[in-house]
C-alpha cells in the first residue's frame, strides 16, 4: 500500500472520474492505489465538501478520518443515528468529535416513517421476519442516508472485502447504484481487519468500548451481539437470520459486474 500517485499515472484516474467512462486499465490503476492515494484522488476529483465520510464509527471509519484530517481541514463526517444504537456508540460520537475536532452530522430517521412502521409492526419488528427487518433498516438507515447525501457527488465508506462474502467484490471507487449513481469510495477495501486494528492502536485512535467485550461489527443494539473467537466478524449481526442470506442493511449495493478478483472488471462507469 505504498504505490505513489505519479507511478500510477494519476491523470488517467482523474480522466476516468471526470468523464465517467469505463476504462479497464484505469480501473486497475485505481485498484492499485493505497488508501491515502485513493482518498487524495477522490477529494481532488470530487471535492471535499461534496464527498462526506459516512461512518458508523467503526475502526475503519477512525482510520479513514485520521487519514482525512491529515489531508484537509474539517472534512465532512456523517453518521446515522438509527435511534437504536448502544449507549457506548453515542458516547463514542463525542469522543470522536473531540479527538479530531470535526463536526459530526448525526442523521436521524424521519418520525413520519418510523411512527407508522412501529405502530403497524411493533418496536422490535426486526425479529418478526426478514421483510420486517429489512423495512426497519430501510426506514432507519437507507432512507436517512439517501437524504443525507442529497447534494453530494460521492461518499466515503469503510467497507473491506474480507468483512463478509457479500463484500468480496467491493471496488475502491465505483458508482453507487442506490444513491443516484454518485461515487462511492472505499479506500480500505483491500485492508484486513488486523491491519485496521494495527493502525488504530499505533495511532491511539478512539474506538467503541464494546469491542473490548467481544463485539466485532457493531450496528444497532437489538441486532448486534458479541462473536466467539474465530467466528466471522459479521456473524454477530442479525444472527437469527439464515447464515447464507446476505446479512446487509441495504446501505451497500454494488454495481453489477464488479469483482475484486478480476480487477479489469472493476466498475468505474
Ligand atoms: Fe432496525 Fe436492526 Fe436494521 Fe437497526 S440494524 S435499523 S434496529 S433492523
Image (spheres, helix red, strand yellow):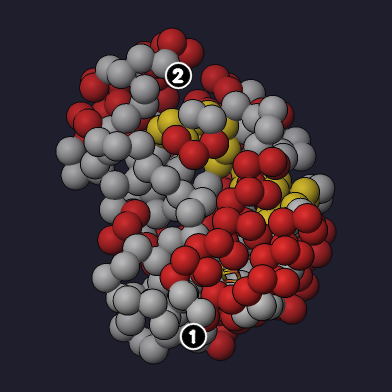
> Disc 1 or 2, which lies upstream in sequence?
2
Does residue 19 appear in the picture of this structure? yes
Q: Position of residue 169 (x, y in %)?
A: 29, 47
Circle 1 sits on which residue?
A: 226
Considering the numbered disc 2 on the image, is that residue within a helix, a strand or a loop?
Answer: helix
Few, some or many C-alpha atoms within 10 Å of disc 1 (few <14, some 14-19, many ≥20)? many
For this orientation, the residue located farthest to the left is 262
Does residue 3 appear in the picture of this structure? no
Few, some or many C-alpha atoms within 10 Å of disc 2 (few <14, some 14-19, many ≥20)? many
Considering the numbered disc 1 on the image, is that residue within a helix, a strand or a loop?
Answer: loop
Quarter of the displayed picture in which ligand 1 can be seen: bottom right
Name the quarter where the N terminus is drawn: top left
Instruction: Kindly indicate the quadrant of the structure image that contains residue 9.
Output: top left
Question: Residue 109 vs residue 166: left or right?
Answer: right
Question: Residue 40 vs residue 92: left or right?
Answer: left
Circle 2 sits on which residue?
A: 17
Residue at 25% of width from left, 43% of height from top?
260
For this orientation, the residue located farthest to the front is 120
Q: Position of residue 262 (x, y in %)?
A: 17, 38
Q: CA distance from mark 1 to mark 2?
A: 40 Å
Name the quarter where the C terminus is drawn: top left
Residue at 46% of width from left, 43% of height from top?
186
Amino acid at each position: 500500500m505504498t504505490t505513489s500517485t505519479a507511478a500510477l499515472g494519476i491523470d488517467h484516474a482523474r480522466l476516468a472520474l471526470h468523464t465517467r467512462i469505463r476504462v479497464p486499465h484505469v480501473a486497475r490503476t485505481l485498484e492499485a492505489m493505497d488508501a491515502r492515494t485513493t482518498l487524495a484522488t477522490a477529494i481532488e476529483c470530487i471535492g471535499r465538501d461534496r464527498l462526506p465520510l459516512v461512518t458508523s464509527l467503526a475502526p475503519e471509519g477512525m482510520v479513514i478520518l485520521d487519514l482525512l484530517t491529515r489531508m484537509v481541514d474539517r472534512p465532512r463526517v456523517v453518521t446515522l443515528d438509527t435511534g437504536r444504537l448502544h449507549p457506548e456508540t453515542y458516547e463514542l460520537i463525542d469522543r470522536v468529535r473531540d479527538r479530531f475536532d470535526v463536526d459530526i452530522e448525526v442523521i436521524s430517521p424521519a418520525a413520519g416513517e418510523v411512527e407508522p412502521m412501529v405502530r403497524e409492526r411493533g418496536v422490535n419488528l426486526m425479529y418478526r421476519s426478514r421483510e420486517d427487518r429489512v423495512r426497519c433498516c430501510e426506514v432507519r438507515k437507507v432512507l436517512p442516508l439517501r437524504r443525507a447525501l442529497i447534494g453530494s457527488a460521492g461518499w466515503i465508506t469503510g467497507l473491506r472485502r474480507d468483512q463478509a462474502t457479500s463484500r468480496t467484490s467491493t471496488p475502491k471507487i465505483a458508482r453507487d447504484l442506490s444513491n443516484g449513481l454518485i461515487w462511492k469510495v472505499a479506500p480500505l477495501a483491500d485492508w484486513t481487519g488486523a491491519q485496521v486494528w494495527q493502525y488504530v492502536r499505533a495511532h491511539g485512535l478512539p474506538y467503541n468500548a464494546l469491542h473490548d467485550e467481544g463485539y466485532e461489527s457493531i450496528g444497532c443494539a437489538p441486532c448486534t451481539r458479541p462473536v466467539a473467537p474465530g467466528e466471522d466478524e459479521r456473524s454477530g449481526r442479525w444472527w437469527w437470520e439464515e447464515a447464507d442470506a446476505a446479512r446487509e442493511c441495504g446501505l451497500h449495493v454494488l454495481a453489477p459486474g464488479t469483482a475484486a478478483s478480476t480487477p479489469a472488471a472493476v466498475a468505474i462507469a
